Structures are given as structure tokens and as C-alpha cells.
Image (spheres, coloured by chain):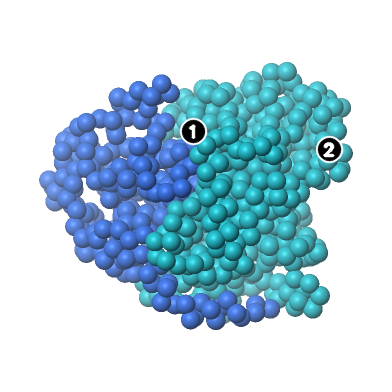
């Protein structure tokens, strides 16, 4: 029988198929952080259980940690307790913990790949919906709830209905200044924020083949924003090169065996998907969101459309009211108060290189507060090593320490009420970046151009 | 965590006629700092229920005394966004046992089933009927019958079947969770753990 890439990985992890019920799925790797794990550990304790395979679990502190003065004790009492609790739980259960200050610390979906833990053909879960990021390597990776975190602790498996399969093909070539972020936002704007609910997506075609590993991560990261459980891309030479030599990557003989297995992880020629979409790379422009879900996005040069039939008029109007926008408004030229570069979507070294390429030799606009937050300590180190920090400083920008930061604003990095932020993150929900904050999602290029002019700016126009 | 068995529920309902309600609205991130599962109900829909000075938004349905009951009826694509189970804990903690919508986000639905909140997906037209029934009479009673997989508008007797897998249904009606099941599979699991994939 012909199989898709998704089938191959999924089926090889099914421990049992329950009739008219979920599959029991073996989980290879488990990432945890301070926010969604504590209650799962309490559950274990109540059942008098230990973590079954602690060596398969990796822990970091990222969601509510400060991004300045990380060497000092965490000021926020509740955040401090949460991080301490994680550390204590990890010690008790023999789990590797990469806390604040640890050189491998960073956002959970950034550190997995950069340490070689994320590999093709694996099943990877984490109590965080953007676990879909790891699909860039041809792994099945998805977010789970805390009950399921407890299941993975106790049994290294979870129970899941096999999702339906969708393929999204983007062929042709991307235009200049169109980044992987734009490709993803473009797709979401076409499918809507619920268009892939119930599906697992495979991305294929020239555009993804051409894309760097970091770009693929950005795309897979955003799969969840159209409702998909996850997204994946078939592993290829680029994937293998990226993994090779990283700390947790297979070595020597194991490496050769791994590569030959990984090379088999491709969708068979006649395999069938439940749904398929085709787009052309040429039709994609730099994108920006104008509403309160990531599907409410348009090419940056366009005006805010009138509500579509499929939206309820009320919800659409509610979103525009929240943003302080009107139907027909042009996006370009709108005044912006904050620019945020970071998160598991766009907080990797390539994103910082991209940002720096635009701002080099220019000055940050006075009306803009810019928060630049690397995704991990390794990213931070590269920023320094590559001289990017100097470029940033010369242009009037400051760099913060790694973490999720204003992506979900659990720490002090909150965009104030009513203020506008162009953000390289993944969610523009009401209040996501702070109560009352107004978020516009865009690429690092748009963020950089906007930071220079203080208003929404098309990166093609600032070069 | 085990929860109460679910068989039949007769209750009035609270309407929330908004589409695409995401988990950041259900429970904003700044309330996720607990290390135990207690008290989340107080912050359910926090930023819609309260003004920034802490006073309640009178018009918000959850603050309106005429709406009561253990059923939350919501617009389509309910629960999109983050995987935070805290969203369902908050709903449960506020006293809801059933959430009705014409469309649910995946992870949210799973999380519901895992902690004993029943997500019921109905057609859009039936959802509209439910909303208009509540609007006419906020005390309208609805029956949720898990055994027959039916959601019934008591007054008119109109009903719709809903889907749930045999496995999850039996979990719900017995108050079991998945860990109870998985713990019996340790042997098979260890075989998987020891096998090389290449
Ligand atoms: S950066 Fe944002 S989306 Fe990514 S893991 Fe952190 S909070 Fe979640």
C-alpha cells in the first residue's frame, strides 16, 4: 500500500489500534517547560508513579522567564516558584534541566533542533502547540495538554485519533523580500485559522525544497495557526547536513544507518491525501495581519478587506474595533509603537541576520520601542560572534536575553494597552502580547523596515 | 486525574455567541503561573469579564445573572490557539460540564475529553436554534444524553446526535482517563522503547 510521509512515521509508532477509538502512540522525545508541566508532576505523585524514561525528556525554562538580568533571582514570585518547581521535579525524576543561565537554555522549539534532539522519523510532543516546529525535520511533532504530559511521563505514550492528511504544494520561485514567514501567513490567510483543523499537513514543492532548515521551521511552526495538529516536510540533504555533528545527533556507524533510514521517509508517488492545495510561489507578497487571528492577513501593500461571507459580521467587526482599524484602511503608513523580533517562529539566527540586513547603517525610529529577543543562548552567542550585535547597537537597538518574552507576555515584557506592535511571533489574539495590546504579525524584514521608519513599511521600499 | 462520571445532564445554558474564541481569551497567559490545578475558574474569560480596573463588564454573558447552568454554548472554532489545558480547567472549575459549538479546535477537544468536559459539536443551524432558544428564555432546559449521544432542546423536543468514539464515551461515563488504560500496556511500550528505528 502506498503511504504518505506522515503515515510512515505514525504507523511505525502505533502500539495498539483501539476499535472506534484512538491509537496508542509511542513517543520518542518529550520537551517540557515550567508552565504546562507542574500539574502533570502532581498527577504522577498522586498515582505514586515515576517518569518511565527520563532520558527521553528534556526540560527548559522559557515561558515566564525575564529577558533582562537573568543572572539575578526572578523577581516575579509566581514565576520564580514555577521555575523552581520545574527544577525540583526534574531533579526528583532524573530529567536533564536546562534552566536560566544554562548554555543550552532557550525556547523549547529552538533548543530541540539546535542540539540535534529533533530528528527525522521521530514522534515528538510538548505541552505547547508550536511543537509543530519540529516537523521541519520530517518528524511527527505536536502540542499536547497537561493530562497528556502526565501520560508521556508515566507511559512514554499517548492516545490519539489519527488525523486526516493534507498536502500543501507551493511550486515556483519566491519573489525578493518574501520570507518563509510570508509563505506561512499567506497559506493561513487562504485557508483561514480553522482551515486545517483535523488535519496533519505535509508541505511540499519547490519553495520548501529551496528553503533553509530554519525557514522550514518557521513554516511548520505556524501550522497550528490554521488549526492543523502539525506540519511536516520530508527530510533531505539539507536536513541531514543541519543535524550532523550536533550534540544529540547519531554518530559514526549509527549516523550512516540513520541517514539511510531517514532517506526513506518520503511520501510514495501515488499516496492519497484527504485534501490538497496548490499555490504558486510567485503570487506571494510580504504579508501582514490586521485582525485578531492569524488568518486575518493581507499582502502589506493592500487595504483591509470587507468581511467575507464565512465570517460572522459581528466577530469581524469586533476584531477591527479591537485593533482600532476600519474596512478599507491601508496598512502601509500606520504608526507603530513597538517592534518585537523573537519567539519560536522567528527567533533564530537567520531571523537576526535578516533583520540586521535591513537596519544596517540606518537609525531606529524614535517613536518605536524595539524588543529583540534571541530564541536561545546559542542564538545569542552567534549574534555576538557574527558581529550582528554591533550592527544592532550602531543603529540604536538593544538586545535582550533569550526566552518567549512578549510572544505570550507571561513575564514583564508586555505591550501596553492600546499600543501597536509589529511582531514576528505567531499569534495576534486579543491581549496575547499584554492586556489590550494590538499585534500585527509580520516577517523579520517587515519588522526591521517598520522599526526604522516608525510606521508600517514595505521592506521592498526601504532598500 | 479521574473525574465525575457523566451520564445524563439536564441544565440551562450560558450563551457566548462569538466565533474563533481562542484559548488566550478563555484563560489569558498571565494566569498560567500556578503549580497546582486550583482556582482557574475565577479567571475564565478574564479580559472579557472584567474591565482593567477590576469591575465586571455587565454585558458579558457570564456576568449576567439571567444565564446559569452547566452548559456553555459558543460560536464556531471554539478553543483555537494554545494547547494550554488550563483553558478547560477554567471552564470545568467555573462549573461547566458541557461545551457546545459548531466547530472545535483539535487540541482543545482532546483536552476536554481528558478531564471530563464533554465537547458537543452540532450543525450551524442547530447551534443558531440553541442560541435563539436561550435568547427567548434564559431558563430553557437542555438535555445531554451521553448514552444515546443526543443533545435535546427540552421545550421543543428537537434534538441532534453528536459524535464521540466508543472508547472516549466509555471513559466519560465511567470517569476513567487514558493513563488508567496505558498503565496496562507497559510491556508493549517497553518493546517499542528498546527497538531501534534504523
Ligand atoms: S515563543 Fe511563544 S509560541 Fe513559542 S513556545 Fe514560547 S510562548 Fe509558545
Q: Is residue A278 above or below residue B49?
A: below
- Quick one: A117 or A23, which is closer to the camera? A117
- The answer for which chain carries disc 2 is A
Instruction: Kindly state the secondary structure of the residue where label 2 is placed.
Output: helix
- The answer for which chain carries disc 1 is A
Q: Colour of chain B?
A: blue
Circle 2 sits on which residue?
A388
Instruction: Kindly state the secondary structure of the residue where label 1 is placed.
Output: loop
Q: Is residue A440 above or below residue A19?
A: above
Circle 1 sits on which residue?
A430
Q: Can residue A305 be seen? A: no
Q: Is B171 positioned to the left or the right of A9 in the image?
A: left
Pointer 1 with pointer 2, Cβ within 8 A: no
Q: Is A293 positioned to the left or the right of A183 in the image?
A: left
* Residue that appears at 75% across and 71% down: A250
- Quick one: A135 or B54, which is closer to the camera? B54
Q: Colour of chain A?
A: cyan
Q: CA distance from mark 1 to mark 2?
A: 33 Å
- The mark lying in front, picked from 1 and 2, is 2
Position of residue A96 measured from the top left corner of the image (x, y, whole percent): 64, 60
On whether ligand 1 comes within 8 Å of the CB at mark 2, the answer is: no
Q: Quadrant of residue A67?
A: top right
Crowding around mark 1 (Cα neighbors within 10 Å: few <14, some 14 to 19, many 20+) is many
The label on residue B177 is none
Q: Are marks 1 and 2 on the same chain?
A: yes
Q: Earlier in the sequence, mark 1 or mark 2?
A: 2
Amino acid at each position: 500500500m502506498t503511504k504518505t510521509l506522515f503515515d510512515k512515521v505514525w504507523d511505525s509508532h502505533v502500539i495498539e489500534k483501539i476499535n472506534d477509538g484512538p491509537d496508542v502512540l509511542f513517543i520518542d522525545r518529550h520537551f517540557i517547560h515550567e508552565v504546562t508541566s507542574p500539574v502533570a508532576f502532581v498527577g504522577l505523585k498522586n498515582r505514586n508513579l515515576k517518569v518511565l524514561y527520563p532520558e527521553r525528556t528534556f526540560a527548559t525554562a522559557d515561558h515566564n522567564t525575564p529577558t533582562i538580568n537573568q543572572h539575578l533571582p526572578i523577581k516575579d514570585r509566581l514565576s520564580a516558584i514555577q521555575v523552581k518547581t520545574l527544577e525540583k521535579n526534574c531533579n526528583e525524576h532524573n530529567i536533564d534541566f536546562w534552566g536560566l543561565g544554562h548554555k543550552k537554555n532557550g525556547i523549547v522549539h529552538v533548543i530541540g533542533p539546535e542540539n540535534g534532539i529533533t530528528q527525522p522519523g521521530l514522534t515528538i510532543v510538548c505541552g505547547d502547540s508550536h511543537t509543530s516546529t519540529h516537523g521541519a525535520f520530517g518528524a511527527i511533532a505536536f502540542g499536547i495538554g497537561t493530562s497528556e504530559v502526565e501520560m508521556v511521563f508515566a507511559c512514554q505514550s499517548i492516545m490519539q485519533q489519527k488525523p486526516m492528511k493534507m498536502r500543501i504544494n507551493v511550486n515556483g520561485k519566491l519573489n525578493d523580500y518574501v520570507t518563509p514567514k510570508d509563505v506561512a501567513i499567506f497559506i493561513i490567510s487562504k485557508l483561514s485559522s480553522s482551515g486545517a483543523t483535523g488535519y496533519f499537513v505535509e508541505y511540499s514543492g519547490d519553495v520548501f525544497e529551496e528553503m533553509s532548515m530554519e525557514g522550514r521551521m518557521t513554516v511548520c511552526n505556524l501550522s497550528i495557526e490554521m488549526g492543523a495538529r502539525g506540519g511536516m516536510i520530508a527530510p533531505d540533504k539539507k536536513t541531514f547536513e543541519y543535524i550532523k555533528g550536533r550534540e544529540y545527533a547519531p554518530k559514526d556507524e549509527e549516523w550512516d544507518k540513520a541517514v539511510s533510514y531517514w532517506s526513506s521517509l518520503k511520501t510514495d508517488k501515488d499516496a492519497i491525501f484527504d485534501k490538497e492545495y496548490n499555490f504558486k510561489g510567485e503570487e506571494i507578497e510580504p504579508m501582514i495581519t490586521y485582525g485578531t487571528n492569524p488568518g486575518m492577513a493581507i499582502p502589506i501593500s493592500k487595504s483591509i478587506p470587507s468581511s467575507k461571507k464565512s465570517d460572522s459580521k459581528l466577530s469581524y467587526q469586533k476584531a477591527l474595533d479591537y485593533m482600532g482599524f476600519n474596512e478599507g484602511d491601508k496598512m502601509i503608513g500606520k504608526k507603530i509603537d513597538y517592534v518585537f523580533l523573537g519567539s519560536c517562529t522567528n527567533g533564530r539566527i537567520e531571523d537576526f541576520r535578516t533583520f540586521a540586513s535591513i537596519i544596517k547603517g540606518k537609525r531606529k525610529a524614535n517613536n518605536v520601542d524595539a524588543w529583540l529577543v534571541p530564541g536561545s543562548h546559542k542564538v545569542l552567542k552567534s549574534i555576538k560572534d557574527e558581529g550582528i550585535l554591533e550592527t544592532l547597537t550602531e543603529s540604536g537597538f538593544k538586545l535582550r536575553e533569550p526566552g518567549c518574552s512578549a510572544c505570550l507576555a507571561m513575564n514583564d515584557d508586555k505591550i501596553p494597552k492600546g499600543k501597536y506592535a509589529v511582531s514576528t511571533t505567531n499569534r495576534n489574539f486579543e491581549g496575547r502580547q499584554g492586556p489590550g495590546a494590538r499585534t500585527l504579525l509580520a516577517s523579520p524584514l517587515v519588522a526591521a523596515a517598520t522599526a526604522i521608519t516608525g510606521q508600517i513599511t514595505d521592506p521592498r521600499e526601504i532598500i | 486525574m479521574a473525574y465525575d462520571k457523566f451520564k445524563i445532564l439536564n441544565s440551562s445554558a450560558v450563551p457566548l455567541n462569538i466565533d474563533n474564541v481562542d484559548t488566550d481569551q478563555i484563560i489569558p497567559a498571565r494566569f498560567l503561573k500556578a503549580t497546582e490545578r486550583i482556582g482557574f475558574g475565577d479567571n475564565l474569560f478574564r479580559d472579557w469579564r472584567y474591565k482593567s480596573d477590576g469591575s465586571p463588564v455587565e454585558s458579558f454573558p457570564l456576568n449576567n445573572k439571567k444565564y446559569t447552568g452547566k452548559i456553555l454554548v459558543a460560536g464556531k472554532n471554539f478553543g483555537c490557539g494554545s494547547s494550554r489545558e488550563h483553558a478547560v480547567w477554567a471552564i470545568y472549575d467555573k462549573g461547566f460540564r458541557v461545551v457546545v459549538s459548531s466547530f472545535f479546535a483539535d487540541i482543545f477537544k482532546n483536552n476536554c475529553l481528558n478531564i471530563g468536559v464533554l465537547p458537543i459539536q452540532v450543525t450551524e443551524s442547530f447551534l443558531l436554534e440553541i442560541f435563539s432558544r436561550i435568547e427567548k428564555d434564559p431558563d430553557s432546559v437542555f438535555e445531554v444524553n451521553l448514552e444515546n449521544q443526543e443533545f435535546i432542546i427540552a421545550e421543543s423536543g428537537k434534538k441532534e446526535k453528536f459524535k464521540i468514539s466508543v472508547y472516549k464515551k466509555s471513559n466519560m461515563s465511567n470517569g476513567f482517563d487514558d493513563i488508567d488504560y496505558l498503565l496496562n500496556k507497559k510491556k508493549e511500550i517497553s518493546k517499542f522503547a528498546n527497538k531501534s528505528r534504523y
